[in-house]
Amino acid sequence: MDGQPPIPPFPFNIRRQMYKGRGRPQIIPPMFMNAYDIRQNQHANQHQLNVWQERVLLRWRDDTMVYVPDGSGKPGVCIMEPQLSLGQNYFEVEVINVGLGKDTLRIGLASIDHRLDSHLGEEGNSVGFCINEGSLFFNGAASASKACRNGDRVGVGIRLEEVMDEGITEKCPVFFTLNGKEIMKKVIPIPARGMCPAVSMCAAGQIVRCKARSDWTSQEEEMVIDSCEDDWGRLHDVTVHGQVLAYAGRGKTIADVGLAQAQKPLSPTNHYFELEIVDPGKNCYIAIGLAKKDYPKKRHPGWNFGSIAYHADDGKIFKGSGVGDPFGPRCHKGDIMGCGIMFPRDYKMDSDDGDSDDEVAIVKEWQDRGPFNRFNQLEHRLAHDNFDVGIYDFPDDDEYEEYLSDEEEELEEYIDKVQTGTKVQVFFTRNGTTIGRRDVQIPAGGFYPTVGMLSLDEKVRVDLRPLSG
């Protein structure tokens, strides 16, 4: 995809109003469908939320929840409809600040009629995991596990395929995860209206960031004894499940790229890798390519200098620029995309992990020329603009290209003229057929297999050594 904004999973013009009859604050997206309609309509937008909250503020711009004390000393609760369902049976948060005190921060599931002044797990219509202490609560009873810290990812899911009938009551296993591994499980009765993701808080300064809902079952099926995580040198907003990479970012702006970069660069003895699109997600913003070792983690491969990539959503090739060129067909679920290098026979691997002295000197000369230091200004604008979701709404491609890629392309052309690195041919394939080649110079340290993703629910199966037999 071009370096332009993806479709956001949450509408930006959310409005607030009081819910008549219960006095609960509610966030209502435009064209709102009630919870019953969402559950019944198989084609409904799963990202439209009905949020019930008291003393907890859900900041939609960055998906964070914060505790807002009102002097009552009561816990705050946030419940998010629709309920978890088959295909969307898992919810996760990242702990930004656990806050002070014990038993003050819980994640779990609750019915929409759960009280908004009672911690999760204190009543029979909810279950909660205490992040501060590592305890699981249901009906007031607790069982201990491992406490969590800032930066941990804590999740909750429900195995609806294992529902058990006990008279007029249905029971189902609910499980909790810590940093991608299951740590606790509890079989609980399921209310008629289902169980929704929920968070309860009771201490100033507590902050968690909500992650996208996903299908934990399919992730588990992909788990193998060898996790393959050692094959990857860098992972940003991407999780590893055997050979499968799953996008774990927000998918709201072009700053939300998920990046996976291999531990080792391609070489004459291992010159090709490929991926299969397991799930194209919302928009199939999937890219396969090569990048230098220190490539920016929040940029799709191909968008910045030192990289080249083939993008599945539009079939374009990107070579160090935020604007791509027509290259090959678009790719869809089940397609296999490949990338490799045709090394010259006399090629020798460069053991240097960093940029060459020549390249460093060239970039420094470019940055220092002129009083405005224009290249650094562009990078500063990008870093600043990442926090403004509307900054990327350009009226046309020409204005966007002028904003992002003119300086990068000019720098790339300038480096290409004076750089003396080895020139090779990078080729791309689709379903076993070569679709094109491009001449590029290998950066110091080599070209590393790199995969980028940018929309919710994307999953790819990667084989870093498909030709090894």
Image: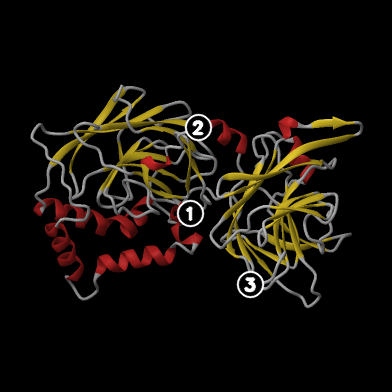
Front residue (pair 134, 444): 134
**Label number found at residue 360:** none
Q: Secondary structure at mark 2?
A: loop
Return the x and y of residue 120 as percentages of the image width and height. 77, 56
Mark 1 vs mark 2, CA separation in Å: 32 Å
Q: Is residue 129 left or right of residue 432?
A: right
Mark 1 vs mark 3: give the one in front.
3
**Where, by quadrant of the figure, is residue 106 drawn?**
bottom right
Q: Position of residue 155 (x, y in %)?
A: 63, 49
Residue identified by numbered label 3: 205
* Residue drawn at (25%, 68%) of the image: 374
Q: Which residue is mark 1?
A: 253
* Point 63% across, 54% down: residue: 146
Q: Which amino acid lies under the numbered mark 3 shown in the image of this protein? A: Gly
Residue 2 location (% of width, % of height)? 38, 46
Query: Quick one: label 1 or label 2, which is nearer the N terminus?
Result: 2
The local secondary structure at tag 1 comes to loop
Horizontal side, residue 237 vs residue 183: left or right: left
